[in-house]
Structure formats: C-alpha cells, structure tokens
Amino acid sequence: MAHFDTEYQRLEASYSDSPPGEENLLVHVPEGSKSPWHHIENLDLFFQRVYNLHQKNGFTCMLLGEIFELVQLVFVVAFTVFLANCVDYDILFANKFVNHTDSSKVTLPDAFLPVDVCSARIRDNVFVIFILIISGVFWLHRLVKFIYNICCYWEIRSFYINALKMSMTDLPYFTWQEVQARIIEIQKEHQICIHKKELTELDIYHRILRFKNYMVAMVNKSLLPVRFRLPLLGDTVFYTRGLKYNFELIFFWGPGSLFENEWSLKPEYKRGGNRLELADRLSSRILWIGIANLLLCPVILIWQILYAFFSYTEVIKREPGSLGARCWSLYGRFYLRHFNELDHELMSRLSKGYKASSKYMNCFMSPLLTVVAKNVAFFAGSILAVLIALTIYDEDVLAVEHVLSSITLLGICITVCRSFIPDKHMVFCPEQLLKVILAHIHYMPDHWQGNAHRYETRDEFAQLFQYKAVFILEELLSPVITPFILIFCLRRKSLEIIDFFRNFTVDVVGVGDTCSFAQMDVRQHGHPAWMSAGKTEASIYQQAEDGKTELSLMHFAITNPHWQPPRESTHFISLLKEKVHREAAAGQQGIIAENPAFTSTHSLQSDSEPRSLIANLLMGPPSLASLHLGREGSINPVSIGVSEGASALRSLSPVSTSQHLRGSYPSARLPRPDHPAVVAGRAMTGSGTDARTISSGSSAWEGQLSSMVLSEYASTEMSIHALYMHEMHNQQSRGEVSRHTWHRQESDESSESVNEDMEAARTFPRSSTFPTTSHQAGAAQQSGSQRHYGRTSDPVSGSFRAQRTPRMPMGGWSEENQMSRHHDPVPEEGSEDELPPHIHKVT
Amino acid sequence: MCVDISYTIMNCRSEVLEVSVEGRQVDEAMLAVLHTILLHRSTGKFHYKKEGTYSIGTVGTQDVDCDFIDFTFVRVSSDELDRVIRKAVAEFKDALGNSGSDGMGQISLEFYQKKKSRWPFSDECIPWEVWSIKVNVVNLANEQERQICREKVGEKLGEKVINIVEVINRHDYLPKMPTQSEVDNVFDTSLKDVQPYLYKITYQITDSLGTSVSTTMRRLIKDTLAL
C-alpha cells in the first residue's frame, strides 16, 4: 500500500483531552469568593459577636472598654497591696511625728514606706504572695482572652464595614432591627448559613439567645433552686451572678456539660432510656463543681469584696442615696424576660418601668420608720447646721479632730433618713401604679391584681425590684452560699433537669438544638388561661407559666414586624389583634367594659382629643421629639409637658391612653384611608406588619427616623397588648370561677376542667384571708395550684390528674412519645421537602 | 490544622447512609458509595486564562463491576483518585476486622473548604457537607444466604445511589467557583486528571459516642478563651 498523505493527523495526548480550540468556546468566569463571609462555621458565636459589637457601639469603644478593664484589674490588685503593705498609717494618722528639717508639714510621700522595706514586707507575707499569684494568673487569662477577642472582633468589624456596609462611626445610630434586616438581606447573597436560602429573624434570635432561652424557661418552670424558705427571712430569692455562672457552667459549656457544643445537646441526653444514670452523673458533676466552688470560695470572696469596695465606695460617697435606690434583680430579669428577647430590649423595657416601680415601692413607707427618720433627720440636721455655721465663721474648726468626718457622716445620715420620708405631695394609688408597671414589665403573678395595696404584694415585687444595697450584699455573700446551693439544692433536681432538657429541646434545621419554649408555639406550650384555650395541646408540664408563650409570641411579632410566624401563630396573633380591635370599637361606642376602675380615668379625658393626638404625633418631627421625651416616664404622650408635680396624674394616664388608642383608631380609619393617622392607628393596634411596611414606604417616613419611630410604637403597642392580655386573663379567670361554681356538672370536657381548676387555683390567693401560698409569686404558683388539684374531689379532675403526672420526673419521660410527636414538625423551618433525608435504612 | 470532625457540625449539611453487608463486601460497598459521591463532587481540571476566566477540562467515567455484589457503579476514571479512596477503604476494613467488636463502623466523607486566617490562627477547614456511611457487618451461615445477600446488597446500593443523586440534585450550597489564587481553598488540585472538591475521609469503629480526644481538647481551649 502506498503511503497516503492525508489531512488526518494523530492528536497529541494531553491530560486536558479537550479538542483544541474548545478552551475558546467554553469559557467560565469564576464567581470567586470575593466575600469571606459565605458559609461561616460557628454562626452562634458569629451572631453573638455581631450583636455584642452593635451593643458596645463599635469596635473602638469596645477596644477601649476592654483595655480599661484590664488596667482596672491591675490597679485594683496593685493598689490594695500597696495600701496594705507600703503605707505607714501611724504617720498618716499623725500618731507618729516625722522629723523634717525644712518644714513641719506632713506630705503624702512621707507616709510611704521605703521601697526595700515595702518589698520585704510583701515577700514575707505568704497570703499576699498567694493573692498576687492568683490574680496574676487571672489577669493573664484575661489578657489572652482579650487578644483573642480583639482578633475575632476585628473580623466582625470588617463584616460590618464590607458586608453590611455600616461604618463603625455610624453604628451607634443604627438600631439592631436594621442590622438584622441587613444580615437577612446579605444572606441571600453571601449564604452565611448554608442550610437554607433565607434566614429569618427568629433564627438569629435563636442563635444569640440559645442558652438564655433555656434559662428563662427553667426559671419559668421553677426548675432552678433560687427560691428559699428561710426561718427568719421568710420567702427569699437568691440568684446572683456567681450562681448564674455556675448554672451555665454545669448546663451549657463546662467540661462534661449537657451540651456537646454551642448548638447541640449530647445525643445521650436526648434519649430517655438511661435518664437515671445520666441524672446520677449530673448530680456527681454538680457535687464536684460545688466542692471546687467551696475550695475557691476564699479567693472569689476576696475578689468580690475588693471589687465591690473599689467600684461602689466612690458611688456611695458621691450620692449616698444610691444605696437606697433600687434595681431590677437578676431573678427579676429572668422572670420578666420574654423568650427571644435580646438584652437591650429587656433593659429598655425595664428602664421604662423603673420610675413607676420605684414610685410604687415608695408608697409603702413604713409610718413608724418615717416618724423615726423625721426625728433623726431633725437632730442630725441641727448638729450639722451648727458645725457648718462654725466652719463658715472660722475654718480652723475643720482642723479639730473628727469634725470633718462628723460632717460627712451626718450628711450621709440625713440623706438616708430623707429617703424614708415620703414625698408630701404623693398620692397613694398602688393599684394604678401596678397597672403602669405591668404595661412595661409585661409579667405579673395573678394574685397581685386587686392586692396591690398589700404588703405581701410589695414584698413579692421587692424580689424582682430590690435595693441596690441588697444586690451588692447578695453578690458579696454569693461565693459562700453558691457551693451550698449547688450541693444541697441543685443536686436534688438533677433528674428533673435531665428530663427538662430532654423534653424541651427541639432540633431546628439550620439552627441546631434550641429550647422548645423559644419556638413560641402556642399549640405546644400555650396556656389555656392565656387566650390560647382550644389551640393549645400542652399538658400542664408543657405549659409555660404566666402566659409566657403567648406574651413572648406577641412581643416577638411586634418587635419584628417582618417576621413570618408559622400558621397557627399567625392565627393567634391576628385573632388577638382583632380582639383588641373589637375592644377598641366597643370602647368607641362608649361601652367601656373591662375594668370599672378604668372608666373614671377614661371619662376624664375628652373623646376627641386622642384622635388628633395620634395624627399630630405622626405628622411632624416636633411631636416625634416630644414622644421621645415621653418615653422616660411613661408611655403616654399626653402627659408630656405636664409638670413633675402632676406625676400621680401622669401615672394614671398610660392606662387610659391605651384605652384611647384603641378607641380612637377605628374612627380614624374610617373617614380617610390615606391619612397618616390611619397608618398610625393600624400600626398601633391593627395588623402591624403590613401597616408598617406601607408606612415605611410612604414619604412621611424616611430612613432612620421611621425605624426609630416604629420601634417606639412597637413598645407602646406591646404595652397595650400586654395589658389587654392580662385583662382578658383576669376576666377569664373571674368568669371561669363563677362558671365553675354554677355549672359544675356541665363541664365535662377535660380541657375545660383543666381550665377551671387552674383558674380556681389561681384566684385562690385572692381570698380575704390571704393564705400563705400567695407568698410564692409567679412561677411558684403552679405548685400551689397543683396542691389544689391534689385536694380536689371533683370527679372531672380525674382526667387531669393523669395529666399532672408529667410534673413528676418520671412522668416527664413517660410522656416522651407525645413530645416527640409534637416536636417532629418544626413549622417555621420551611416545608418538609427542605429537610434532608437524614437516614436511609438498608435493612 | 484540620481536626477530625466526628460530632455534629454546625452550618454544614450532613447526610447519613446505613448499609449492612457481609465482611467481604465491605470494601466494594464503600467504594461504590464513596465513588458515586465523588463522581458528582469532582470537576475537570481548571485552566485559568489571563482575563480571569477559566475553562474546564474533561472528566472520563468508567464502570466498575463488583465481585461480591451484584452491582456496577460508575466512577471518575482517575486512577490516582481511585488509589486514594481504595487506601482509605482498606484501612477502614482492616480496622473493622481488628476491632473484634460486633462489626459496626462508620466512614465519613467530608467536603470542606479552607479559609485563610490571619497570623495567630491556623487556617480553618470548614466543612460544608458530610456524608456518613454507617456499616453493619453481618455474618452469614451458608452459601445460599450469601447468594441472597449478594443480590440484596446490590439492590440496596442501587437505592443509595439514587438517594445520593437526589441529594446532590438539590440546589443547595456549594462553594463558589474560585479565582486562580483561591483554587486550592476549594478544590483538591493535587491530582492531575481530575479535580474534586477538597475532601477528607475519616472512619470510626463502633459507635463509641465519645468525641476524639483532640476535639475535646480543642473545644476546651476554645471555651476557656471564649468565656
């Protein structure tokens, strides 16, 4: 065969065995990971840091704050050691004379010991060395943590700047809701979370507040041993930061804790099989941690004392009255906290309630003390006046021994006494004050209603709202008491704790294990006495106390208007809003039902006034400013500009305002649908979501201003809803009680009987004898009511004694089937087809 | 430093497959599953051009017949990749054999991406998808049972493959296509004929719930820092 010359040629082998030229045909452009923010590993930490950075007003503020904290630590230790070892107090007190050649004046440096003497004294003192070593280790730990944190937060800073497009200087002026909205926005682009296309507000809250929600739920179900019955002090609440730290250490992050990592419970705790063994393990862990606390107690105690001394002496010297001031106790903060409520939301709520609360507490001045205080103040005042007069006449008086100190002491004495003397112009109206407080704090045990004037109510409220001095004292005592609480009280609860975590943990796709209460699902955890009757399927063990599920749901829906709740919750919310609406319509027609006490206040103000008020409020910036001012005292804008003297009147008005707002808005809506007042009215009470989206689009509302305004209204709206829900709850309980007595035989439906018995139990403390059970506020009430069930001979309650068993530790787990059935569908995490098919079984 | 991840990972898809096979079928079954996943998680080599674009080389596939199972699977025709997988599977099988336990084990194929961090920290490996295959080894008495098992396992593996394809077909998160400088953070570029996403194969014998010592240590340190 002849050699052919052909066009066909052998191709060169190449690994990229694509035909030549294809590179030019099919060209791809890399999307590139230009942003480093896609797919973040630990979203919990990430969101927490984003939140913290926002709360601390940007990177620089935080950096400075942390640096100063470190410096402060060194200073506290160094200064104490110096004061203890290097000062010659004899010279300072002039017991010993210094022989100076040039002058007779004693100077401060004279009192210092020479360096070598000083260091020798320190070296000889084993105790001081010990303290120095301990604090050195502690400080180094803090330093390492600081450096680590700075590196992490630097990343968050660039996240803010590059991804969220917010500069650090502007950050303090953005609300958290705005930051959150941007995060949700960029999730679409960057995919921070890879499980789902879109994040919801609830996801972010769940991650930031994962452990807080558990704690709130545990306080709500009175699982944590924080209430004690003491022989002399009666019912007390002891919950300090140290105790809280230990709880968190045991449950959430300490070595061997129940949680495997930030987002998942260890698998063995999710199974009911070996609960007893796990409880044993937990109780031995608690024992060890308790013992460690006991051993470390001296160190912590010294630290607490030093710290308290240095942080509070200055304050006490500057304003001695601050010790007599009150603050929200740590227990109160957990009791009053909604599920899924961030720190700043809680704090602003509580701060709004502060004034009314302290006014309420001041109503209860003991007359005896007042008399004594008046007279002590008189005597102290006269001596002080003489001393001051003498000093003015000739300042050498000051040089006389103890004159200066007596002036100081007398001054303090008078200030303290004055705090016991009530304001002459104050009016005693506790019931209304308590309503105002309720509008802000949203939670209150039922038996306070109608008993506001009683000392018991005041004492219980004092558990939530304690003296600052008591707070400091408790913190100081905490290192000593904490180990005993851990060893003797918490250990006994270990089985309940194990059951709690197993029963109330749900695995949410893309979020991890969260507390099921935090889902705010009315069906699972609703309380029939709190407007979710008929909707809830929860047993008593599963019901959140004090209407926490319902109120939390409302609160979350109102603060996050863009959030799409699951179907049932939407139904609940819209139903409630509609009820408020109807109520408003009724109020408009003059049928003022709810509470007779309101009627008088309602009629005080003219009907037409609030309508124009709302319109005015939303018309222009001046009124916005006034609204802003009004925030500090009460929610009522009417009272702005009213002088301080009319405080009693003002304290009344929020209640009436809420009536007015409800009353005013339907009428505003009817005539001119496009009028801003309509928008406002709807934002206040009606369907908040759409109203706000509409309004934010309209020209009257622009940018930041609108979001500020909306958040203001959100809190007002929530106050109205909280008041309304409490009112409904009370009315319902009252109604149910009467029905209970009238138609006992007819109530054959078990859920109703639950209802009624609950109500009966709840109103039980209202009786004039005021039985001892009423001493236990809030969460403890449940136990009271259960005692009641135990006693009852009503045949209907048989069905529900069976339900009561879950309360017992054993029952908690016998119920597990039901629990798992409830928890399987996680409504807000999208449809089922989004769930990955986790397990494919072969055999 | 990439730590072995045996606990549940946040922000990462995780798929679990379970198979029960006879002792001699272990490696073929594992190979079938791992190769099937890798087939869908590999691309051709990237050839970057000057303008920041790239073209993708081709990838061949080839059928593999199993000896002990009535099953044929498709794998990327890359001998290098095959060698790596075979090595990992062989180790797993040995460990399973040596463990002397009831023959339970788990092999996981984890896809991750690297994230460069600044100085004090080492590079992070962040997994985005983890496939865990739980293996249960059964002992069979006679040849007839073996024959049945042979067919049954083949059928089950077929189902698994369909499952895998279903999962992969969903529009879930995948790392974005990298630029030339970042290609090593996303793809394993060490092989010369194929370019899978960065992956790691780990195994665990018996379901001994405990997390490994290194993870626990790492977590302890992290926890202390993050107090």
Image: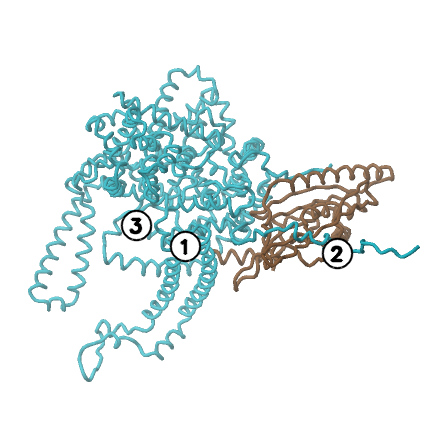
| Residue found at x 16% / y 41% | A643
- Which residue was labeled with disc 1? A479
The amino acid on which the numbered mark 3 sits, given as a three-letter code, is Lys
| Residue found at x 54% / y 35% | A830
Q: Is residue B151 above or below residue A598?
A: below
Residue B141 drawn at (x, y percent): 84, 40
Q: CA distance from mark 1 to mark 2?
A: 62 Å
- Which residue was labeled with disc 2? B80
Residue A649 drawn at (x, y percent): 19, 35
Among the 4 quarters of the image, the one containing residue A683: top left
Of labels 1 and 3, earlier in sequence is 3
- Give the position of the C terminus of chain A as an image quadrant: top right
Is any atom of residue A65 visible in this view?
Answer: yes
Q: CA distance from mark 1 to mark 3?
A: 18 Å
Which residue is at the far right?
A1
Mark 2 Cα shell of 10 Å, populated few (<14), some (14-19), many (≥20): some
